[in-house]
Amino acid sequence: MTGDLDILAFGAHPDDVEIGMAGTLILHTQKGYKTGICDLTLAELSSNGNVEIRQREAEQAAKVMGLQERLNLELPDRGLRLTESYIQKIAQVIRKYKPAIVFLPHPEDRHPDHGNCSRLVEESVFSAGIRKYRVEEELAAHRVGKVYYYFINGYEHPHFTVDISGVSDKKKESLKAYKSQFIASDEGVETPLNNGYIEAVEARDTLFGKEAGVKCAEGFVSKRPLVIDDLLGD
């Protein structure tokens, strides 16, 4: 599928975006916006499951979220270095789908791949908007209107939240699509992900919601000041 997207979220691995902002994607899809995810790697070094299983799980999660597009750049897991070839690949995706908003992982995270993904996408967003910057396909420059950061493992104080109270069950369903990652099995090994991780994500959403005065919310960070046109409006 091709065509403009309203929201494009990037993650280092399939399941990163779901952890941080599946509810926000579901909510906006339900409102009629076009949403998509670009995973940078196949997570081929994951302790549990394998690439084939993980891809099936990612597609199932995409169906739950109602995404218009999900793609994978197949960059090397644990190899997300800041290289020009990787920046070009990501910039090409941005030019192709012309997102109004790009989401990327918060750069401060215990997993180095998440921070590296964030820096790569930041560079790519900037390069994609430069008219003379060249990518593999002949695509016109595209300037992303807004860039926001979502949390994967972090609990930093968000700059703003999105109320996902009405879709929290769907978010949980999207996470449970990754059985190989979040559900312990006799064939697998114990990891932080299959030892109460979904419950920890729910607890964070509840915490952010409580601070915002709603049941559940996902938190985000913006490096640029947010503009409020009406202080008394919704």
Image (cartoon, rainbow, N blue to C red):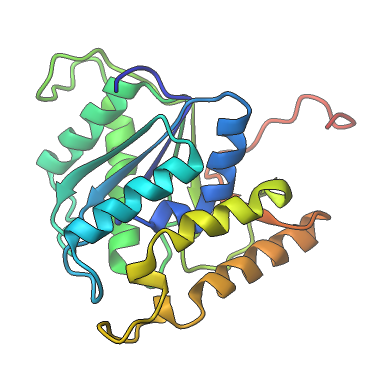
Q: Residue at x 25, y 12 (%)?
A: 140
Q: Residue at x 18, y 57 (%)?
A: 52
Farthest residue toward the right? 232
- Left or right: where 18 falls relative to 124: right
Q: Is residue 89 above or below residue 229?
A: below
Residue 29 locus on image (x, y percent): 55, 32
**Quarter of the image where the C terminus is located:** top right
Q: Residue at x 34, y 60 (%)?
A: 114
Can residue 60 be seen in this snapshot?
Answer: yes
Residue 231 locus on image (x, y percent): 85, 32
Q: Nearer the viewer, residue 136 or 81?
A: 136
Q: Residue at x 15, y 48 (%)?
A: 74
Q: Nearer the viewer, residue 4 or 143?
A: 4
Q: Is residue 124 above or below residue 189?
A: above
Residue 127 locus on image (x, y percent): 26, 29
- Left or right: where 21 falls relative to 212: left
Q: Report the number of discs.
A: 0
Can residue 118 be seen in this snapshot?
Answer: no
Q: Is residue 93 above or below residue 148?
A: above
Residue 161 locus on image (x, y percent): 67, 49
- Left or right: where 182 falls relative to 125: right
**Quarter of the image where the N terminus is located:** top left
